[in-house]
Image: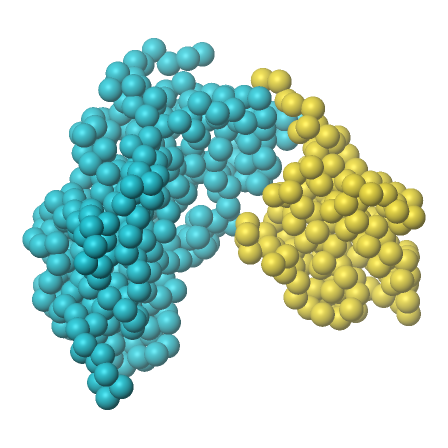
Chain colours: A yellow, B cyan
Amino acid sequence: MFTSDELRELYQEVILDHNKDPRNFGVLDPCTHHAEGFNPLCGDHLTITMNMEGEVIRDVRFHGDGCAISKATASLLTGEIKGKTQEEAERIIDAAQEAVTSSVTSDLSPLLGKLSVIAGVREFPARVKCATLAMHTVKNALHGEHAASTE
Amino acid sequence: MTSERIMDPVLLRAREDFPILTRTVYGKPLIYLDNAATTHKPQCVIDALSGYYATTNSNVHRGVHKLSQEATAAYEQARERVQRHLNAASEREIVFTRGTTEAVNLVAHSYGALAVRAGDEIILSGMEHHSNIVPWQMLCERSGAVVKVIPVTDAGELDMDAYASLLNERTKLVAVVAVSNALGTMNPVQEIVRMAHAVGARVLVDAAQAMPHMQVDVRAWDCDFLALSGHKVYAPTGIGVLYGKEELLNAMPPFMGGGDMIRSVSFEKSTYAQAPQKFEAGTPSIADAIALGVALEYVQGIGYERIAAHENALLQVATERMSSIDGIRIIGTAQHKSCVVSFVVDGVHPHDMGTYLDREGIAVRAGHHCVQPLMKRFGVAATTRMSCALTTTFDEVERCADAVASAVAFFRS
């Protein structure tokens, strides 16, 4: 069966690859920062653990069961923020949130790096929350708030 | 490959009664397999709604003018149609509600206040929809009663031996679903009621999913309460029914206070109307109730035997085709099932499956189906569910199975 162009736009090779083979998957124990994320619409659950040294994210992992969009976003996002300062990581998350909710590109978009492939999700409004779950959860971990929800 | 099976010509013709089935999504013909979430409406139901507003619209039970009399007559005729459909003993046993959820909440509040005390037990099943769990938990918080749960077997059936051992003299009420929304399992309602009555417990049946697939007969089941939603059986949203045995409804205190449910009101004391008006405070959903009556006549006109024969054949085709897909696991393999196939596939999350099928024009439900305890029982967070209607064709379920297979190939590639 032919797979439509719109589907290929959403599920780009990079996303399918990170879905099958997620990077930074696991749990850091012990860790300095952690948060849990929950999407009540689909029951998906995500745990972020990280170790920070001063302002710098030395290591970060995600764990949980989710769809391709949520897994690939978590995999790519954790990759992008590793080694960055808290402030840099938050600007990357802001850029990612903007990319999946708005078609207007701002000066934040160059910060996305490999994460730019998730922008296709904005054409699928029912799936935007799948992408933002990891963003909310990482932000909460950075802020020391331990629970996030997409609702 | 398409099936050699020929669809019942009466049902094939019935497709023409549903205008929405001619539309396309993303340029493809709509294949609607989300009927357990809500069903589409035949033209006669749509006409009943618009016809009411175009010719009769008026408030019920209070006007002396012609339109109000006609509206009242049509509304009460709808109640009689529901009564006949359910084989209730009297139209006084039929209370119109907004849906199954409101009907269950009505019983939890009103019968709960009448009969449920601290230490009493309420038995639910492990396959209940959240709407038949949460109202009872809220009642337990108010009353000090406790909830007990009938376990579900690996096939998705109720463990009837475990049920027997849960029943005792503290059991006040058993609330159980007739047909599971997520698994399709058809439960042995008559047996469940008989066993509950043997210990003096009352039974509420959630018949929301049973209504489109089987003849529901409250006197054959001998249930004390039964809840249903119009929109699951080709009627509009916003209308449902609580059936209750007359002596119970009359003994129960009102649920909501307001107009239409009173006999007299003074600031010192108000007295209440008899059932069913006692439970219908405020202006009801008149047009939707009338349309529900029309929808039930439509289904009776087609006939449940015909519907069941077709849906059983569809279920067989769907199950065979889906089972052959590599890595698929069908959740819910009960011996008696409605035409629902709920499944998970290794490496493909239900939401990705749902999005993929959507772009093929196929509407399914992906998620926890408001049965999170049941999902946990089967060790999954969510499933993809295809659910059929009397209009579903063999070709549609086969196209869905083909699309599921290509989605699996796509996500694994």
Front-most of A141 and A52?
A141
| Quarter the C terminus of chain B occupies | top right
Q: In x, y percent, where is residue B64?
A: 19, 58
Residue at x 33% of width, y 30% of height: B43
Q: In x, y percent, where is residue B164?
A: 19, 60
Residue at x 26% of width, y 38% of height: B295
Above or below, A6 relative to B247? above
Above or below, B22 relative to B51? above
Front-most of A45 and B267?
B267
Residue at x 18% of width, y 62% of height: B276
| Quarter the N terminus of chain B occupies | top left
Q: Residue furthest front?
A: B65
Note whether residue B324 is visible.
no
Q: In x, y percent, where is residue A136?
A: 72, 58
Drawn side of residue B131 relative to residue A75, left or right? left
Q: In x, y percent, where is residue B293?
A: 22, 43
